[in-house]
Amino acid sequence: MRIPTFSRERGATLCPLVSGYEAPSLRPDLVSEETRKPFLPRFPLKPVSPVWHPPGALALLKGAPEPEPRETRQSTPPLSATGLGGHRGVALSFSATGRESIQTAMVTGALLFSSFSRFRRACLPPLLIGPRRSYSQDDAFSQYLHRSIVPTMHYQKSLPRLPIPKLEDTIRRYLNAQKPLLDDDQFRKTKQLAGNFENGIGRELHNHLVARDKQNKHTSYISGPWFDMYLQARQPIILNFNPFMAFTPDPKPEYNDQLVKATNMTVAALRFLKTLRAGILEPEVFHLNPSKSDTPGFKKFIRLVPSSLSWFGAYMVNAYPLDMSQYFRLFNSTRLPKPKKDELFTDEHARHLLVLRNGHFYVFDVIDQNGNIVKPSEIQAHLKFILSDNTAVPASPLAYLTTENRDTWATLRQELLDNGNGEALRKVDSAIFCLCLDDFPIKDVDHLSHAMLHGDGTNRWYDKSFNLILAKDGSAAVHFEHAWGDGVAVLRFQNEVFKDSTETPAVTPQSLPAACDSHGAVEKLNFKLNDALKEGITKAKQNFDATVKTLTLKSLKFERGGKEFIKTQKLSPDAIVQLAFQLAFLRQYGQTVATYESCSTAAFKHGRTEAIRPASVYTKACSEALVKRPSKHSTVELRQMITVCSTYHSQLTKEAALGQGFDRHLFALRCEAESQGISLPDLYKDQAYALINHNILSTSTLNSSSVNLGGFGPVVPDGFGLGYSIHDNWIGCNVSAYPSRNAPEFLQCVHKSLDDIFDILEGKQISN
């Protein structure tokens, strides 16, 4: 498969928009006409101006929502498998100008807090969040996950804006990242081109970008170009973009029954939807000091602070609200194939669920006319009815079309519309989400990865914002489309669904489905296919099968230790795993290559992602010492090299989280040149620029108790896709590769590298 020109990460990805107030995804050029009107009543589009533009800010969420302070973690979210990752805390440091900018707000907030503290008990109603309990009876069923006293979008208006780095800093960081990849002659050439760019056309483009950013204070400078990058990509989205995150099995085995679990997860998803749209979903906040900020008292206080100042109130207690502008694309959304550039479609008024089984399409309402969730026993009955349909897979499974090249699929979709399938397609596109019920059990971890990342092509609608997949044995995963978001919303959703479905299940294994007319309630969609469509489906299947046949997926579990031990050594766990990847590739292939790690900038308004570049002169020197000449260095010397790598990686992580990387800035400047009609600057024509954006090692980390495994495809044909997680006492890694790379051997090298690093940290000699 061909890969887009510009580097990108998966999801969230493992390495991924709700905006109740202002959403870049509602740009007219990105959204179909059908999408805009339904949102007007519930999501006002009036732009809001930020209060403050910080010189730098906030916490790092690399795709996942498990906050961990930098002091205790020293590294890293989730797999952004797109994207797979956990929150990384970073210590914040503001300039004098920045401190002066917020002084008034902080003083005001302090006075408010002092004034309200004496009266809040009398003036404020009690917390609306009650104790959790199991709802196995329809009459005891709750419509919401919880009732946050702080409105969901309370912080959105006052979020700081994503800073544009100084051009000289971007060039410096770019050259630092290039140095380990180039020989001396190549580096001299690249340095000269970079200098010419900085002092010439690059400065002009930077000034244009800054001016444009000042005119669009309701969003970020990267949001529009990043949407365009995804939506203009013509490659199939499956394997090239879409990641998956597999659920941890329910701790109660009897609840892993496919029907029971599908019902409970569907109900939990609907409760998430209702809680979100009611504005009572807990805001996404990164707590550096939860004992002060994640308390009923603070929530009672902060809800009374105007939304234009609310971020500053949270900042006072070391809490950092995250952008939630991606959440509204989570439900009722689909990526529509269009010639040259796709569109994002959303219809929040649709009340039905789409279910796929054996390549057949079923829809039924899961929200009633009053806006309430249909009784769980009725949902269970409808799903049981679908599971009882033993009709064979269609001769021409329509879902294969979503695996095609986007222009090809756009042409075939128009053919579908012209052939009288408009109403059926509308029901697919507008469905709340797609539930995929597979008719086979999962055999092992590798089978799980294949099933959830791509499946057989018949039982997924890859264009939906997400597919909730359940195998015959109850193994479950979320597979999501990447254009609408970076996995931040998806991971929050997955965490909430797992918690709700396991702690307060709507049905039990003993629950009986309702005695209702499922035959009348469930509609099986039929599509009219002419010869051109049947031929298109056949070709799509051939292309899909040929590509999937070449893909290898393998996993590793390193059980010698995890982040607990690494932290005792005062090192960054994420830096250690990234160093192991560098060691492994050098051991296997004898070189250092372009490496990409996804980092969320969700701490800023409409932030997307920034890249961490783990391959450095420090990791290269350390890798060569450990792999090529370990006997020439003492354990103390090798330990010092590892420490230097960790320190530098932590610096890169902090810079990326604060929007101070180089990848997004250079990408935006290139887009600026295109929009201005300026010929491509020489910097972008340099072979070295192509080399560093040919990410042979594309990585993303994910840490969440609800996620068992995550993964994504390689972003280049000769690359590895690496989703990994760092647990207290073990490290997991899931790797994907095409035939030009040996994935099992690479994982063996990763294991050897981790063993060597742990030996050194324990003061032992290592062997070749």
Image (tube, helix red, strand yellow):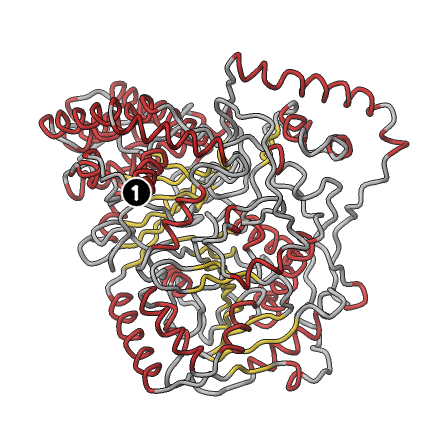
Q: Is residue 349 above or below residue 670?
A: below
Residue reaching furthest to the front:
677
Residue reaching furthest to the right:
122
Quarter containing the N terminus:
bottom left
The residue that appears at 65% across and 22% down in the rendered structure is: 316
- The local secondary structure at tag 1 comes to helix
Q: Which residue was labeled with disc 1?
A: 674
Residue 609 left/right relative to 674: right
Q: Is residue 702 above or below residue 368?
A: above
Residue 392 left/right relative to 494: left
| Occupied quadrant, residue 286 | top right
Tell me where residue 641 appears, x and y as whole percent.
27, 22
Tell me where residue 539 appears, x and y as whole percent.
28, 76
Tell me where residue 213 appears, x and y as whole percent.
46, 33
Residue reaching furthest to the left:
185
Residue 389 left/right relative to 504: left
The residue that appears at 56% across and 67% down in the rendered structure is: 430
Residue 287 left/right relative to 392: right
Tell me where residue 317 appears, x and y as whole percent.
65, 24
Q: Nearer the viewer, residue 171 or 27?
A: 27
Mark 1: amino acid: Glu
Q: Is residue 538 above or below residue 215?
A: below
Q: Residues within 10 Å of mark 1 (few under 14, many from 20)?
A: few
| Occupied quadrant, residue 169 | top left
Q: Is residue 758 visible?
A: no
The residue that appears at 28% across and 71% down in the rendered structure is: 545
Quarter containing the C terminus:
top left
Q: Is residue 200 visible?
A: yes
